[in-house]
C-alpha cells in the first residue's frame, strides 16, 4: 500500500477520523532551476553530470553567486532542499583553483559531521583531484591528528572540539589559520540560548586568531526555517549577512494529520496516553509496508516504542531487524548501520530522539510520526521533513499528548502550518559567558592595550578585572595569561555555569565511571544525598554529594519509587533597566534580579500510584543566580475586586498560561524560562507576575518577552477562551484541584485587564 492509498483508507475510518483535528494536504511543488554560475571551476560541471546534476536549484545558484562575490551568506530553506551544495561547490572550486585554500566546517553533532564528510568525499572522488577532507573530533585517532592539522584542505568538526581542541592549540594549526578562506556553520537554528551565546564567543576567538595569522575567511551559514535567520547569523558572526531564502527545490504532496487522542476523563480533560496512540499509528504504517520514522522526546520513550514495534514483526527465530531504535548513547558503528539500513530499505521503521532531526542522510522515507511536540516549530518541521525527501507523496502524523503545549499546537494547526513566530535568541555579551571566553582568548593570544574582542563591550575593563585577579599580567602594553589552569577545559558550551558537577557511578567499587554531568543550579533538586537519579531508565541512589569538589557519587539500585525535592525560591531586585507605568497603576518593568534557591526536603513517591511514601531532609547551601527578568505589577483597582484566594488562583492561572505561551514565542525549551506569581512581591511590594531567564546573566529571553508582552498576553487569552473546559484543565490555566473552582474565570478577568491597560502595542 502506498501513502495515497493509506490516506484514502484512513479518511473513511470513522473511529480514526473522530480524533483528527485537521487533515491538511500540502500540494506538490515543482523545482525551479538556474544554470551553474560562470565563476565556478569548469572541472566541477562534468563531475556533477556524472551524478545526474545538470543545473542548480535557484537558491543554490543565488547562494553560490553571492559567495563568489565575497559575501557572507545564510541559506534558509527546508529539509532536503540541497543546502549542502551551496557551500560544497564554491569551496571545492576555490581549492581546485588554489590548492593552499582551506575551509572549516562546523556541525552541531558528530553524527552529522560524519554524514557530511561521507557525501563530500564521494564528490571529491569523482573529481579525481587530491583534496583532503578529514573529520577532527574526539573519535579521531591520535595518529591521524597530525595529518589533519598539516594537510587537511577541509576540516570538519563541531563547536566543542573547536573550542577546546583547536583554538587553544592554534600553533599546531598554522597551515589552516594562514589559509582559511571559508567557515561553514550548518543548522544554525540549533545555536540558540546558552549554546548559541557560547558559539558566538568561540567565533570571536576564531576570527581573532585568523586576523593574527593574516587570513580573512567568509562565513557560509545554513538554517532551517526560523523567524530571524539573518539576525541570528549576524549575532553569531558579528558581520553583515546576505540572506538567501528563495527555495527552488521540489517537494512531493504531503499529508499532514493533526491527531488528538480521545478524552477519557471529561471533567479533568485527561486524554488517552500518547505512547499507546503512537504505537498504534506507527504499527499501522509498519504493517502496511510504509517506511517511517517516529520521533520521541526522551530516550526512555524511544526504547519502549522500539520494543512495542519489534514485538509486532518478530519472526519465529525472534529476529526483528526491520525495526530499530536510534538515540544518543549508541555506538557510532551501530548508528551508521541503522542509517545505511534506512537508505538501502532494509529498515522499515526507526524510532528516534531528535538525533535524526538534523540533516543526516537516511534516504527517502514515506511517513513520519511525531510523538508529542518537540519544543519548537523549527524542530517539528525538521522532523516532519525527514519524510517525503523525493517527489512521491508522504504523510506526517502529529500525535498530541495531554501536555499544555501539545494541546495548544493541536488546537491551533494554522499556527503550526502557516506561521513561524519563533525567534532564535542568544546573548553573547552575557557576562558569565563573555568572561569565560575572554579568558580563553587571552590564553590563546595576549591582548594588547586597546584591543577589541569582536563587538563585545568594554574589553579593556575585562582586561583590568582579570589583571587585578592575577589571571592576566600587564607588561609592555600587553596582557599575558599567567594562571596555571587551562581555561577551555572548565567551560561547557552547552551551559552558562563553569562549575558543572560530574556524576560518578560507584556501583562497581573497582571501576568508578563518569556517566554524566549537571549544572550547579539543578544539582540541589536532583542530586542531593538519598535522591533517586534516573539515567537511561536505570535507577541510582545518590550516596554522596561533594559540593566543593563538584562531584556526585551514585550507586545503582532497584526501588519502586522516585524522589521529588521541594525548592524554595526567593527573588530580590538588583536593578531596574526599563519601566513603563500607566496612570491607573499597572506597571511593566525589565531589570536584573537575584534568584536564591534552597532545597530543604524531598518526598519519596511510588511509581504508578504516585502515593507519598515519606520524606527526608536536604542539607545544602543556598545557591544564588543573578539573571534578567520582566514583570507585571497588578494595580490595586484590579486586585481589590477579588479576595486573597481568588487573586492567588487567578494569578496562578495566568502564570500557567504564560508557561505555555512563552516557550512557543521565544523559541526556547520550557525549562529556559521561569514564570512565577507573588501576591506580595519583594520586588514591587504588590501582586506581581514575573518571568525570568533560567540562566546566570540571562540570554535575552526576558528582554524579548518584554518587547512582545502584549502579544504574549493576547495569546494567553486566546488559549483560555478557546479551551472547551468549564473551570480549568491542564491545557489552559491548570487543573481545578490546583487553581480552584473560580481560577479560570479570575484568570480571564486579570488577563483582560492587563491587556486593556497595556501601554505597549
Image: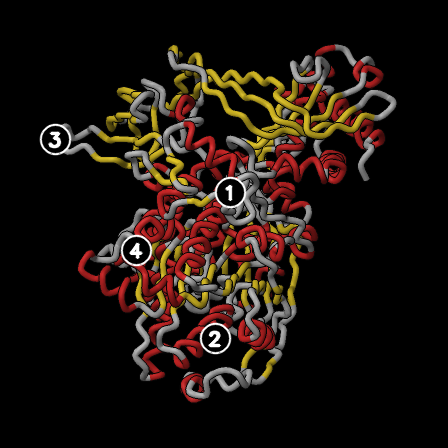
Q: Which mark is residue 92?
A: none
Closer to viewer: mark 2 or mark 1:
2
Q: Residue at x 31, y 68 (%)?
A: 152
Lower position in the chain sequence, tag 2 or tag 1: 2
Which is more toward the observer, 500 or 361? 500
Lower position in the chain sequence, tag 4 or tag 2: 2
Verify CB contact (< 8 Å) between mark 4 and mark 3: no
* Left or right relative to 728: residue 467: left
What residue sits right under mark 4 in the picture?
171
Q: Residue at x 24, y 26 (%)?
A: 555
Closer to viewer: mark 4 or mark 1:
4
Lower position in the chain sequence, tag 2 or tag 3: 2
- Disc 4 is placed on an element classified as helix
- Disc 3 is placed on an element classified as loop
* Residue 723 visible in the shown view: no
What residue sits right under mark 3 in the picture?
510
Cα gap from disc 4 to disc 3, whole angstroms: 40 Å
- Disc 1 is placed on an element classified as helix
In x, y percent, where is residue 401?
A: 55, 41
In x, y percent, where is residue 599?
A: 44, 16
In x, y percent, where is residue 715?
A: 73, 39
Whether 79 is drawn above or below 572: the answer is below
How many numbered marks, from 0 up?
Answer: 4
What residue sits right under mark 2 in the picture?
90
Lower position in the chain sequence, tag 4 or tag 3: 4
What residue sits right under mark 1 in the picture?
274
Q: Residues within 10 Å of mark 4 (few under 14, many from 20)?
A: few
Amino acid at each position: 500500500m502506498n501513502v495515497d492509498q493509506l490516506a484514502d483508507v484512513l479518511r473513511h475510518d470513522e473511529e480514526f477520523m473522530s480524533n483528527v483535528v485537521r487533515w491538511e494536504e500540502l500540494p506538490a511543488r515543482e523545482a525551479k532551476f538556474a544554470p551553474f554560475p560562470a565563476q565556478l571551476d569548469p572541472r566541477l560541471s562534468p563531475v556533477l553530470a556524472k551524478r545526474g546534476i545538470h543545473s542548480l536549484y535557484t537558491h543554490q545558484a543565488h547562494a553560490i553567486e553571492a559567495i563568489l562575490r565575497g559575501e557572507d551568506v545564510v541559506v534558509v530553506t527546508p529539509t532536503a532542499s540541497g543546502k549542502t551544495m551551496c557551500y560544497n561547490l564554491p569551496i571545492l572550486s576555490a581549492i581546485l583553483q588554489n590548492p593552499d585554500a582551506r575551509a572549516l566546517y562546523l556541525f552541531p553533532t558528530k553524527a552529522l559531521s560524519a554524514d557530511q564528510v561521507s557525501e563530500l568525499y564521494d564528490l571529491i572522488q569523482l573529481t579525481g583531484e587530491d583534496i583532503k577532507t578529514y573529520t577532527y573530533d574526539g573519535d579521531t585517532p591520535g595518529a591521524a591528528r597530525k595529518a589533519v592539522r598539516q594537510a587537511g584542505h577541509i576540516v570538519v568538526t563541531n563547536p566543542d572540539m573547536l573550542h577546546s581542541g583547536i583554538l587553544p592549540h592554534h600553533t599546531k594549526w598554522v597551515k589552516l589559520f594562514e589559509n582559511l578562506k571559508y567557515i561553514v556553520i550548518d543548522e544554525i537554528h540549533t545555536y540558540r540560548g546558552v549554546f548559541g551565546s557560547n558559539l558566538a564567543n568561540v567565533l570571536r576567538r576564531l576570527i581573532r586568531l585568523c586576523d593574527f595569522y593574516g587570513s580573512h575567511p567568509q562565513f557560509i551559514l545554513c538554517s532551517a526555517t526560523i523567524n530571524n535567520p539573518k539576525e541570528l547569523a549576524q549575532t553569531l558572526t558579528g558581520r553583515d549577512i546576505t540572506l538567501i531564502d528563495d527555495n527552488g527545490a521540489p517537494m512531493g504532496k504531503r499529508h499532514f494529520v493533526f491527531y488528538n487522542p480521545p478524552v477519557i476523563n471529561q471533567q479533568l480533560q485527561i486524554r488517552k496516553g500518547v505512547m499507546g496512540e503512537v504505537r498504534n499509528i506507527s504499527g499501522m504504517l509498519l504493517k502496511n509496508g510504509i517506511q517511517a520514522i517516529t520521533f520521541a522526546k526522551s530516550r526512555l520513550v524511544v526504547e519502549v516504542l522500539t520494543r512495542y514495534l519489534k514485538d509486532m514483526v518478530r519472526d519465529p527465530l525472534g529476529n526483528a531487524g526491520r525495526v530499530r531504535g536510534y538515540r544518543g548513547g549508541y555506538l557510532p558503528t551501530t548508528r551508521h548501520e541503522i542509517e545505511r539500513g534506512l537508505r538501502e530499505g532494509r529498515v522499515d521503521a526507526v524510532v528516534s530522539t531528535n538525533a535524526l532531526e538534523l540533516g543526516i542522510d537516511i534516504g527517502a522515507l514515506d511517513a513520519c510520526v511525531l510523538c508529542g511536540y518537540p519544543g519548537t516549530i523549527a524542530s517539528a518541521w525538521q522532523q516532519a521533513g525527514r519524510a517525503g525527501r523525493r517527489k512521491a507523496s508522504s504523510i506526517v502524523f502529529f500525535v498530541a499528548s495531554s501536555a499544555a503545549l501539545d494541546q495548544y499546537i493541536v488546537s491551533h494547526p494554522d499556527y503550526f502550518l502557516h506561521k513561524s513566530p519563533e525567534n532564535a535568541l542568544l546573548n553573547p555579551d552575557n557576562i558569565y559567558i563573555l568572561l569565560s571566553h575572554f579568558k580563553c582568548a587571552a590564553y590563546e593570544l595576549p591582548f594588547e592595550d586597546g584591543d577589541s574582542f569582536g563587538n563585545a563591550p568594554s574589553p579593556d575593563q575585562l582586561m583590568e578585572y582579570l589583571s587585578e585577579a592575577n589571571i592576566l599580567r600587564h607588561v609592555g602594553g600587553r596582557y599575558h595569561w599567567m594562571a596555571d589552569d587551562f581555561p577551555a577545559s572548565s567551560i561547557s558550551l552547552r551551559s552558562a555555569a563553569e562549575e558543572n558537577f560530574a556524576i560518578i557511578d560507584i556501583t562497581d567499587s573497582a571501576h568508578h565511571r563518569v556517566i554524566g554531568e549537571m549544572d550547579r543550579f539543578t544539582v540541589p533538586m536532583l542530586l542531593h544525598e538519598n535522591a533517586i537519579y534516573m539515567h537511561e531508565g536505570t535507577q541510582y541512589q545518590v550516596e554522596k554529594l561533594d559540593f566543593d569538589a563538584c562531584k556526585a557519587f551514585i550507586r545503582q539500585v532497584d526501588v519502586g519509587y522516585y524522589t521529588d525535592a521541594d525548592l524554595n525560591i526567593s527573588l530580590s531586585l538588583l536593578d531596574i533597566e526599563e519601566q513603563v507605568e500607566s496612570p491607573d497603576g499597572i506597571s511593566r518593568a525589565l531589570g536584573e534580579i537575584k534568584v536564591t534557591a534552597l532545597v530543604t526536603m524531598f518526598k519519596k513517591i511510588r511509581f504508578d500510584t504516585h502515593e507519598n511514601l515519606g520524606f527526608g531532609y536536604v542539607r545544602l547551601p543556598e545557591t544564588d543566580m543573578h539573571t534578567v527578568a520582566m514583570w507585571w505589577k497588578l494595580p490595586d483597582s484590579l486586585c481589590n475586586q477579588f479576595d486573597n484566594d481568588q487573586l492567588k488562583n487567578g494569578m496562578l492561572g495566568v502564570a500557567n498560561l504564560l508557561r505555555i505561551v512563552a516557550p512557543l514565542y521565544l523559541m526556547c525549551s520550557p525549562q529556559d524560562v521561569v514564570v512565577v506569581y507573588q501576591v506580595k512581591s519583594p520586588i514591587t511590594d504588590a501582586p506581581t507576575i514575573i518571568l525570568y531567564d533560567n540562566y546566570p546573566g540571562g540570554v535575552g529571553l526576558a528582554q524579548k518577552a518584554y518587547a512582545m508582552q502584549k502579544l504574549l498576553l493576547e495569546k494567553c487569552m486566546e488559549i483560555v477562551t478557546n479551551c472547551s473546559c468549564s473551570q480549568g484543565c491542564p491545557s489552559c490555566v491548570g487543573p481545578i484541584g490546583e487553581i480552584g473552582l473560580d481560577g479560570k474565570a479570575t484568570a480571564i478577568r486579570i488577563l483582560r485587564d492587563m491587556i486593556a491597560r497595556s501601554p505597549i502595542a
